[in-house]
Image (cartoon, rainbow, N blue to C red):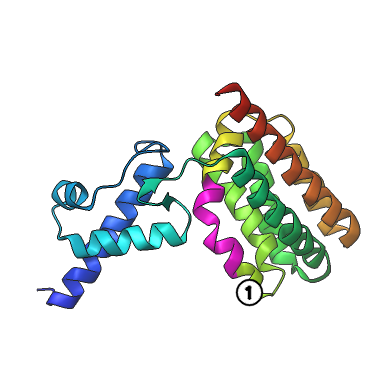
Amino acid sequence: MLRKNEKTRHAYHQSYEILRDQILNGELPGGTKIVEEKLAADFGVSRTPIRESIRRLEYEGLIVKKMVVSPTEKDLRNMFQIRILLEGFSAKSAAAYLPEDELDSLWECVEIGKTGTIEEIMKANEQFHEIIVDASNNPVMIDIIDRMKSIIYLFRRTVVYYNRPFLIEEHEHIYEAIKARDGQKAEILMQQHLQSDLDFCLHLLSQNK
């Protein structure tokens, strides 16, 4: 049997994952009020693991002031500005340092992007960017991007589900620049790629107003 601390920890992890997934899959849309008592009753746990789950989701940016985040145009621009700077540098680093086996993994992500299901493309898209960010070998930079991962997922889902034009072709061009060890080109291509993601998301946001 699980001891009390282990039970509490298990309840926290389970509650966090369920709540995060409900936000990421749209079951709890932006603007939804988060009520601890209701969630505790729905999940069959005490309020303590719910409170800890909310705290972590606040840290990740998915909950703001006890409400599911509903990013504004300014939020989008701010987040992508950080990504353009950090992931651009990471792509430049990848061109210099990424090992051959990781290059192969990067290419696999491109291939899945061309032929996979939506969920497979989502996963490959995430992995493509993770491989490149990890190549920065900068733990502070990696941690910043990791903290943004859940919010990034929301916008990654947007560009994949709404089939942003040239998404996978851009990945292929970034891969080719990294493989050719052309750091300057890889950096510029990554920056342009993320700017295109931002422009696409802003366009959809303006249509939904």
Q: Which residues are magenta?
A: 143-153
The percent coordinates of residue 74 (x first, y second) are 63, 43
| Residue 148: in magenta span | yes
Q: Nearer the viewer, residue 133 or 172?
A: 133
Side of 173 where 32 appears, left or right: left
Quick one: label 1, few (<14), some, or many (20+) residues within 10 Å?
few
Residue most toward the left? Answer: 1
Q: Which residue is mark 1?
A: 140
The vertical placement of 206 against 8, above or below, is: above
Side of 192 where 65 appears, left or right: left
Q: Quadrant of the C terminus?
A: top right
The percent coordinates of residue 146 (x first, y second) are 55, 63
Kindly identify the residue that appears in the image at 67 percent across and 45 percent down: 77
Given the image, on which type of amino acid does mark 1 rest?
Val
Give the overall secondary structure of the magenta segment: helix
Kindly identify the residue that appears in the image at 78 percent across and 63 percent down: 89
| Number of numbered discs visible in the structure rendering | 1
Is residue 163 shown to the viewer in this render?
yes
The percent coordinates of residue 46 (x first, y second) are 15, 60
